[in-house]
Amino acid sequence: MSEVPLLQVEDLVKHYRLPRERLLAAPPVVQALQGVSLQLQRARSLGVVGESGCGKSTLARLVMALEAPSAGRVLLAGADLHALPAAALRRARAQLQMVFQDPYGSLDPRRSVLHTVSEPLRVLHRAGAAEQRERAAAVLDAVGLRSGDLAKYPHEFSGGQRQRIAIARALITQPKLIVADEPVSALDVSVQAQVLNLMRDLQDRLGLALLFISHDLAVVDLVCDEVVVLYQGRIVERGAPRTLFVRAAHPYTRALLQAVPRLRPGKLREVRPKAPARPFATADVSAGCAFAPRCAFAEARCVAQRPLLRTVDGEPGHEAACHFAERIAAMPQND
Amino acid sequence: MRPQPRRTACGTVRLLSPLLEVNDLRVTLPTARGAAAALRELSFTLQRGDTVGLIGESGCGKSLTALALMGLLPDGARMSGSIRFDGCELSTLGEDALCALRGARIGMVFQEPMTALNPLHTIGRQISESLRLHQGLDAAAARAESLRLLERVQLPQAAKRLDAWPHQMSGGQRQRVVIAIALACGPDLLIADEPTTALDVTIQREVLELIAELVAEDGMALLLISHDLGVMAQTVQRMLVMYGGTVVEAGPTAEVFEHLAHPYTRALFAARPRLGLARGTRLATIPGRVPELADLPAGCPFADRCGWVVDACRAALPAPQPVAADHTVRCIRWRDIETAAR
């Protein structure tokens, strides 16, 4: 490819050392990310899904250069964020902004909307008061709020409006990449729809790239061009939502899909029979597939040898880390 | 064998009356801007063994309803109307009698398993607490019963977990413990307020299955509070859709899903992102915002956001209109809306 991708994550590893449990014992280590690679082109959106503890928020923090990786690189337009000198990193930060999950916690209740929204400008550009106000009014307009709202405080807004303020704050530096960590999961259904529509509009209008982290598959399906599924710090499947959610090739993706509550009235137990037997529920999988203990399809090979992320045969652009990806993908998806 | 619950002011079992009968319940809360009608004209019944869902968005009054049922309304709240539990009026009951009821005949599962448990007490001690309080068990008997309960909620290695601390467990495991506490005294009614909102989808599924299973086995009634239509669809027989402090639609789940008689129910349905929508599809949104409880309109609370509104809607809160047997809707235009949607 001729163009340098906007975001390149190369073999990212992050360990966290926990406090010692006993004085002389080695401190336990959490392997939050164990070699994650991905690319995001300009104006595209990439969804990251997985359960809590899978490493998706760690990935967001490393991409935002809020923390340093244990190994691997994060390249923004070709420049390694974690190798940049402080001043250059500060300039680069104008290119990437973040929207957090909880619009109640992410806005300072004692600061006006103007103060909150224009803060990135003050920090990054040292802009003057008139310019701050003018640009803050412009981004508020872009997210569907009024410039009259600038003097108000967060408590005067509903959850959805607060999330719009948080999005406006992210937009004010005219970033190329927005990292959104569960941006709608704290919102009510009707408000969630407004914010999702807004994010899509902005993406189209401003040519933003979006790294969209969510546990909600339906939301990711709606917003993203491509999806990666994380499990215990590794990518287990990657592909376009259409492919991934119709022909899931990893048993974990299937499990996620099956767990989504359906809008068809009926008893839970009638919809799905009791979970099938898990042949390796108690096996040591340190050398094998981390999902094997929860997997109904696991065989001895899964415990012995870790499956690598590879292209599913006959499906370019669809990758899965499963020895039996082709067989799994061919199975009917129970709708 | 489960020990018999201690007799309380409401301890006698009257099989003929419904288990729970809420009639014209109104709650006003003091706010900085004056008294707010947080619940109004709320009426519903729950038979023994019924599973009923209360669905609505934040601020619609669904959690407040649960608190009113438990007699746990915040200070300064004023309540009128009637809550009859097993034939006994709760709204006039003293604090002692309510204490005897809570945890014994009414169990509650809260949303946040992280904060519902006391971090300074072991799991075993927290389950034993209500057994010792309500059933007068001694420490050894309460511990044995706690172990049985942990096994019942399918917590792996239950015997080891009795002496574990909440921080040593995952969210799903903690929610199982909270369920065990709610079940400890064999309640007749289980109230679960967003029991799976804080959990991952796969764990959510397991916890919902567990609740459904336990409710069916014990013949408990379940009042499940949730904002998730999918969760409702698969867990409850009847649902109550709440908006602006009142029930705007009530009926068997399948009926409600088929008719979507109230425009709010319909809008809620349309706004939900679903797997398989074409990328780029715009989700239907509801214009405007949830009304402030302090200035609810006199008429239909949804009037300001409804495309079907006529003057009569704003005159008075519409009375429940029958849609089908056991299915009512507070909308004077539901027939027009249904005809138009076909």
Image (tube, coloured by chain):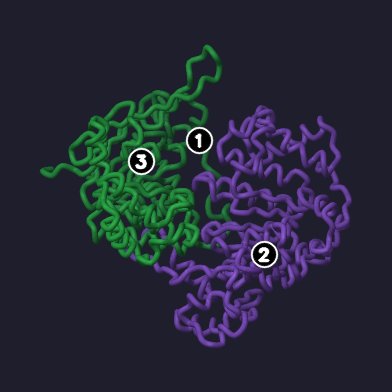
- At 57% from the left edge and 80% from the top edge, which residue is drawn? B331
Label 2 element class: strand
**In the rendered image of this protein, does residue A141 appear above or below residue A239?**
below
**In the rendered image of this protein, does residue A93 appear above or below residue B158?**
below
In this figure, which residue is indicated by the disc labeled 1? Answer: A278
Of tags 3 and 2, the one toward the viewer is 2
Quarter in which the C terminus of chain A is drawn: bottom left
Chain whose colour in the figure is green: A
Quarter in which the N terminus of chain A is drawn: top left
Within 10 angstroms of label 3, few (less than 14), some, or many (20 or more) residues? many
- At 56% from the left edge and 70% from the top edge, which residue is drawn? B256
User: Residue A61: x, y in percent?
Assistant: 36, 38
Q: Which residue type does callout 3 highlight?
A: Ala
Q: Quadrant of residue A223?
A: bottom left
Give the camera-side residue of A279 and B327: B327
Distance of mark 1 from mark 2, alpha carbons? 52 Å
Q: Quadrant of residue A37?
A: top left
In this figure, which residue is indicated by the disc labeled 3? Answer: A60
Chain whose colour in the figure is purple: B
Q: Which residue type does callout 1 highlight?
A: Arg
In this figure, which residue is indicated by the disc labeled 2? Answer: B29
Distance of mark 1 from mark 3, alpha carbons? 32 Å
User: Residue A52: x, y in percent?
Assistant: 46, 40
User: Residue A155: x, y in percent?
Assistant: 50, 58
Share a chain, discs 3 and 2? no
